[in-house]
Image (tube, grey):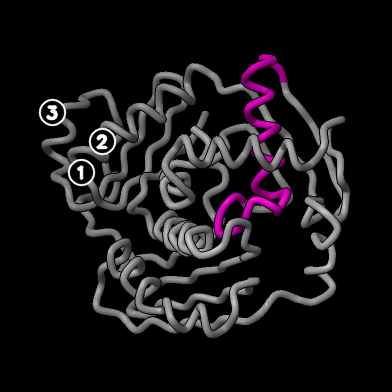
Amino acid sequence: MIEKVNPAHPDKCTDRIAGAIVDMAYRLEDDPKIAVEVLLGHSYRKIIMETSLSNDTVSEHLQDIYDAVDRINGYPTKTEIIYTGQDEHLAQNQSGGIRCGDNGIFKGVPLTAEQKTLSQFARKMYTTHPFDGKYILDGERLIICQSNASSEELLKLYPNAVVNPLGDWTGGTDVDTGATNRKLGSDMADSATGGGLHGKDLSKADVSVNIHAFLKAQKLSRPVELCCAIGDDTVDGLPYSEIVEEAREYIRSVGGFEKFAEWGLY
């Protein structure tokens, strides 16, 4: 049993906006420190970020952030951006080398055939219906909730599915709110974490160790459980710097943090 939401779901829009801001930070610094939270809903968008980028640098690139928000969530809404520097004690954690930027627990689990099938189905649907949508596969039972689509037409294509049980709907942030990292079940399948994947730089274990645990579980075909404390310089018997580089290559391979946020780990 698995649920998958597409990149136009309000929660995924917030993940994508947070990812776009992290992408921007990496264009401005080689190894920035940044954490971004985004809230969308009903004609309002709020972004809070703490970062190693100077206030002047962020101010110079605010229009880039507004442009990303409009591109991803193009509703006529009010946008508020709050930004501040990184806490000086947290900043010191990385001053002597690359070490864990957070505490965390992580469980990577191999993907099932059912999970892979639903992920492929969601991507296929998004190519023809790039609007808010969510889907569940439970054995042979497929549930399709797709906004801005004719339920009658979808039933012709998928006659054995449950399609839009309440009828046609419009979706988006005029219907629902969105918040960063609220769809981790969709992003991670049976894998689990105490943190969130999106809106954070690679020094954060929530990003790098989650990616490491997930990739290792796929390779070994068994669950992988890890934990770390802030300041650790080794995790899973590896230098933390190697785990960061593994995650950096993975993020690069999928096209950046915003692209990673579209579908998560699968």
9 in relation to 141, above or below = below
**Local secondary structure at mark 3:** helix
User: Closer to the observer: label 3 or label 2?
Assistant: 2
Main SS category, magenta section: helix
User: Closer to the observer: label 1 or label 3?
Assistant: 1
206 in relation to 128, above or below = below
Q: Are marks 1 and 2 in contact (CB under 8 Å)?
A: yes
> Upstream in the sequence, badge 1 or badge 3?
1
Q: Nearer the viewer, residue 92 or 37?
A: 92
The disc at residue 156 is: 3
> Upstream in the sequence, badge 3 or badge 2?
2
Say which residue label 2 marks. Answer: 125
**Local secondary structure at mark 2:** helix
The disc at residue 214 is: none
Q: Nearer the viewer, residue 114 or 130?
A: 130
Query: How far is disc 3 from disc 2 in space, using C-alphas?
Result: 14 Å
Residue 167 visible at all: yes
Residue at 52% over, 28% down: 1
- Three-letter amino acid code at the position of disc 1: His
Counting other residues with Cα less than 10 Å from the Cα at mark 2, is it few (<14), some (14-19), or many (20 or more)?
some
- Three-letter amino acid code at the position of disc 3: Lys
Residue at 46% over, 20% down: 139
Residue 228 occupies which quadrant of the picture? top right
Q: Which residues are magenta?
A: 197-222
Residue 74 occupies which quadrant of the picture? bottom left
